[in-house]
Image (cartoon, grey):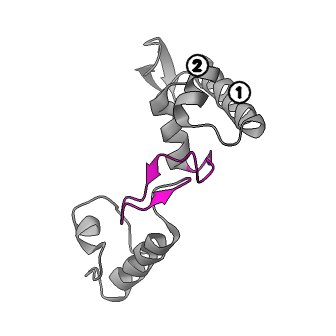
């Protein structure tokens, strides 16, 4: 079993998948649940307000938003689509750009690895790695 230092507390632990130890993982999940509960009661809060009320860092809250684990109201959102820049409430792309990304992936597979469309440069640049299951 591989041993690693926890990314958060630097303690040595047997690493399976996560870069953090079980104690830090548990603490992070408790913090996430506190943030989620706060948002249930304060649905129009901004990331800064959530951070101040719960103690979760601005970066961690933004990470949870990008992962799709949390969603802000449209009025409070600070996230922008990584494709077009439009304001979004969760994730990385707005619905229109997500459709385009999926179409580009489908095109890439159907053309034997060549990409077309507005996201092709991003796909070729290595922002997304996929394996063609048809080969």
Along the viewing direction, whichever of 118 and 10 lies nearer the viewer: 118
Q: Quadrant of the C terminus?
A: bottom left
Residue 107 vs 86, above or below: the answer is below
Give percent across and percent down for residue 100. Answer: 42, 77
Residue 55: which numbered mark, if any? 2
Along the viewing direction, whichever of 102 and 51 lies nearer the viewer: 51
| Disc 2 element | loop
Q: Are marks 1 and 2 in contact (CB under 8 Å)?
A: yes
The residue where tag 1 is placed is: 34
Give percent across and percent down for residue 58. Answer: 48, 30
Q: Residue at x 42, y 62 (%)?
A: 86
Residue 120 vs 125, above or below: the answer is below
Judge whether residue 76 can be spotted in this image.
Answer: yes
Magenta region's main secondary structure?
A: loop
Along the viewing direction, whichever of 75 and 120 lies nearer the viewer: 75
The magenta segment is 68-90
The quarter holding residue 45 reads: top right
| Disc 1 element | helix
User: Crowdedness of circle 1 by 10 Å Cα count: few (<14), some, many (20+)?
Assistant: some
Give percent across and percent down for residue 37. Answer: 75, 33
Q: Residue at x 70, y 37 (%)?
A: 39
Q: Residue at x 46, y 18 (%)?
A: 8
Count every numbered label the image shows and give the total. 2
């Amino acid at each position: 079993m591989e041993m690693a230092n926890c990314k958060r507390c630097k303690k040595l632990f047997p690493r399976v998948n996560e870069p953090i130890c079980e104690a830090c993982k548990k603490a992070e999940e408790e913090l996430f649940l506190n943030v989620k509960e706060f948002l249930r009661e304060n649905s129009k809060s901004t990331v800064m307000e959530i951070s101040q009320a719960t103690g979760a860092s601005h970066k961690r809250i933004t990470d949870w938003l990008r992962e799709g684990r949390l969603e802000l109201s449209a009025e409070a959102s600070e996230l922008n689509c990584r494709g077009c820049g439009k304001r979004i409430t969760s994730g990385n792309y707005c619905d229109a750009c997500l459709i385009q990304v999926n179409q580009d992936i489908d095109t890439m597979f159907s053309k034997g690895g060549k990409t077309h469309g507005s996201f092709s440069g991003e796909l070729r640049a290595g922002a997304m790695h996929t394996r063609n299951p048809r080969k």
